Image: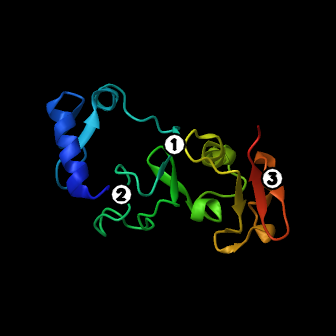
Amino acid sequence: LLQWRAVFRALRIMELSGEIVSGYFFEGISGLQFMSHEAFRLVQKKPLHEDTVYWLNAADPASLCGLSRELAKGLPLRVASTFLVYHGPRLVMIAKRTGKSIDLFAPPDKAGLQDYFHVFKDLLMREFNPSSKIIVETVNGEPVQRSPYLAPLKEFGFRSARNTVELWKQY
């Protein structure tokens, strides 16, 4: 259903009906690009603030995962269970397997580190297909229970389990 040919056709129809615009908005990404009018206005009006923390799915069309080696350098594969967290233009966290494996690129004592973990609360609280809990097994390749990131994860709300930490959905 979501093959590029079908998606492209739908996007072109949306463009012709005036719902979205097409063009070349971002350097280094070949081919036609699409965005909503609201996104276009935001990109034109207000640059991304250096302190903005945001996340996106690796399979999101805006993600560079899976593109050319030059553009996707250091990025994971384009997999729906992988999430990328950015602090301004810097990639600060990769959560693979819906959080089971986390790679953090900031020190454990960094101020604001817990802002990067909000992706997990979003996954628990989203309207479509929310998770009931997030289980973290490893951080930077080592077991989470021996990780220097264990304390910040617990401060955020994760609880120790046998060999993992878990964040449960709050109703």
Quadrant housing the C terminus: top right
Label 2 crowd (10 A; few <14 / some 14-19 / many >=20)? many
Judged from this view, the residue extending furthest toward the left is 16
Q: Where is residue 139 shown, x and y percent of the image?
A: 67, 67
Decide which of 3, 142 is in the foreground and name it: 3
Which amino acid lies under the numbered mark 1 shown in the image of this protein? Answer: Tyr
Residue 127: x %, y % from top left: 57, 38
For residue 64, the mark is 2
Relative vertical location of residue 37 with respect to residue 9 in this rendering, above or below: above
Figure check: 90 above or below 147: above
Instruction: Report the disc number at residue 96.
Output: none
- Upstream in the sequence, badge 1 or badge 3? 1
> Cα distance, mark 2 to mark 3?
31 Å
> What residue sits 51% from the left and 42% below the top?
54
Side (left or right) of 69 relative to 104:
left
Residue located at (57% from left, 47% from top): 129
Q: Which residue is mark 1?
A: 54
Give the secondary structure at mark 3.
Answer: helix
Q: Quadrant of residue 92?
A: bottom right
Judging from the image, what secondary structure is the residue with disc 2 in? Answer: loop
Considering depth in this image, is 26 or 57 the residue closer to the camera?
A: 57
